[in-house]
Image (tube, helix red, strand yellow):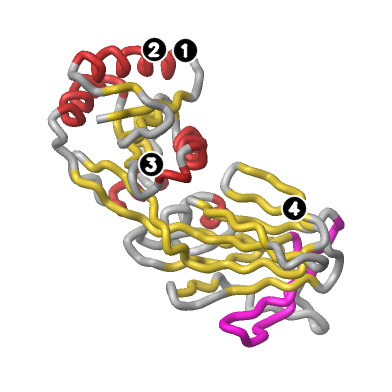
Amino acid sequence: MKFAIQSRNDALSNRLKDEAVDYLTDFGLVFDETEPEIVLSIGGDGTLLHAFHKHIHRLQETAFIGIHTGHLGFYADWKPEEMEKLVLSIARKEYNVIEYPLLEVTINYRQTEKATTYLALNESTVKSPEVTLVMDVELNGVHFERFRGDGLCMSTPSGSTAYNKALGGAIIHPSLPAIQLTEMASINNRVFRTVGSPLILPAHHRCVLTPVKGPDFMVTIDHLQLLHKDVKSIEYKVASEKVRFGRFRPFPFWTRVHDSFISSDE
């Protein structure tokens, strides 16, 4: 079996990376950053996002495993002191693979038929370089609303606990094939009006954003921030691809939610 490791590059994460390489190669596994079957992410959820995008071309062949060297994360659920136990489980192939839905983002341009397509593990956001974002929101080919505000965020179920939650969006179990649109400081008064609530869309639905004001937009894909010029439309849907995670033991999603947002050491 081939494996690769993504480290947060702090002292502890790098030490654990070296240990993992030694342990796994001792068990006959091959360190291969080009075609890994297992990718260990050592750091936090941000580290795993980097690992995901680095190996995004191998989603059908690669499973991700997270080891956290800071706070407990939704993607990084192993502790540093459990490294030897994890390595033994990997070497013995004592794990199941679970799949979570991803977000597909397609950006169309005014002067060309070529489009740019991305996959997001957590979310994609759209903001205007100007003060206010003005976008027509279309759902399944039907105009829904004209949004005015700071921006819009479309998240995956596994990303619903990230920026989406900070915006007041719902937390969605990652087994559900859906995406969620949340607003950033929408303008609502007697003249302008939006629905003002998050929208949860199933896998067979499409959301298209069409610019009303300005053709240039700042678009984020997880941790990546990109300026797109001359935009005709931005289309969101549940991707046909999925991300794969190696699971060695039960760690229910709602337990993660509780431990991350409710549990206290006091």
Label 3 sits on residue: 75
**Residue on which disc 4 sits:** 218
Local SS, label 1: helix
Amino acid at the residue labelled 2: Arg
Report which quarter residue 251 is drawn in. Answer: top left
Which one is earlier in the sequence, the residue at label 4 or at label 2?
2
Please tell me in which quadrant of the rendered image residue 245 appears. top left
Identity of the amino acid at label 1?
Ala
CA gap between label 1 and label 3 equals 21 Å
Identify the residue position indicated by label 2 in the image. 15
Q: Is residue 170 above or below residue 225?
A: below
Q: Nearer the viewer, residue 61 or 82?
A: 61
Label 1: how many Cα within 10 Å (few below 14, some 14–19, many 20+): few
Q: Residue furthest bottom?
A: 142
Under circle 2, the secondary element is: helix
- Which secondary structure is most common in the magenta stretch? strand
Q: Identify the residue shown where x is 39% and y is 67%.
A: 177
Residue 225 in the image: state x and y as whole percent: 68, 45
Give the label, 1 or 4, closer to the camera. 4
Res 11 label: 1
Q: Give the image location of residue 39, x and y in percent.
A: 36, 33
Q: From what the image shows, is residue 232 above or below residue 130?
A: below
Q: Find numbered disc 3 in the image and state the secondary structure of the residue it sits on.
A: loop
Q: What's drawn in magenta, residue-wise?
A: 130-150
Q: Is residue 6 above or below residue 166?
A: above
CB of mark 4 within 8 Å of CB of mark 2?
Answer: no
> Would you say residue 139 sits in the magenta stretch?
yes
Q: Amino acid at mark 4?
A: Met
Point 47% across, 53% down: residue: 159
